[in-house]
Amino acid sequence: MTKPKKTGLRRIINAAGYSWQGLQTAWKNEAAFRQELALSFVLLPLAWWLGGNGVERALLMGSCLVVLITELLNSAIESVVDRIGPEQHPLSGAAKDIGSAAVFIALLLVVVVWSLVLFDRF
C-alpha cells in the first residue's frame, strides 16, 4: 500500500521547507552562490533606486535573480554528477561544463541588461 501524498496547505508548507533546506545547502557548500548572493544584496537595492519605472526595475532585479536561479540549478547538476561517482567521464564533465556555461550566460545577461538600462538613462 502506498503512502498517500500530502495535498493542500501541508504540501505547500513541506515544499517551502525543502526549498529552505536547498538554500541553506547552497549557502553552506557553494562559494559561487555565496558570492552571487552577496552581489545581489548590493545590486537589488541599486536596481530599485536606479530603475526609472517598474519595467526597468523588473529587468534590473530579474537579471540578478536569474543568476541565482541558474547557480542553484548548476549546483544541483554538479551534486547529481558527483553522487554518481568520482571517476572521470566525458558526459559528467560535459554536464558540469554546460551548467557552468549557463551561469556564465546569466552573468552576461546582468551586464547587458544593466548596461542597456543605465546607459539609456544617463
Image: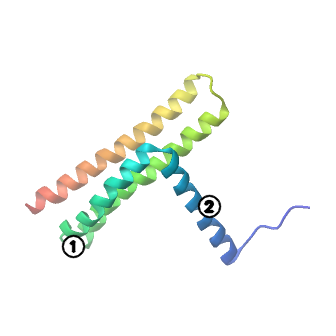
**Residue type, numbered disc 2:** Tyr
Q: Give the residue at x 82% y 67%.
A: 4
Residue lying farthest to the right in this orientation: 1
Q: Is residue 49 left or right of residue 80?
A: left
Q: Which residue is mark 2?
A: 18
Residue 110 in percent (x, y) is at: 28, 51
2 or 1: mark nearer the eye? 2
Residue lying farthest to the bottom in this orientation: 9
Please tell me how crowded label 1 is: few (under 14), some (14-19), or many (20+) other residues with Cα within 10 Å: few
Residue lying farthest to the left in this orientation: 122
| SS at circle 1 | loop
Q: Is residue 16 left or right of residue 31?
A: right
Q: Which residue is mark 1?
A: 53
Residue 114 figure quarter: bottom left
**Residue type, numbered disc 1:** Asn
Q: Nearer the viewer, residue 7 or 44?
A: 44
Q: Of label 2 and label 1, which has the lower sequence position?
A: 2
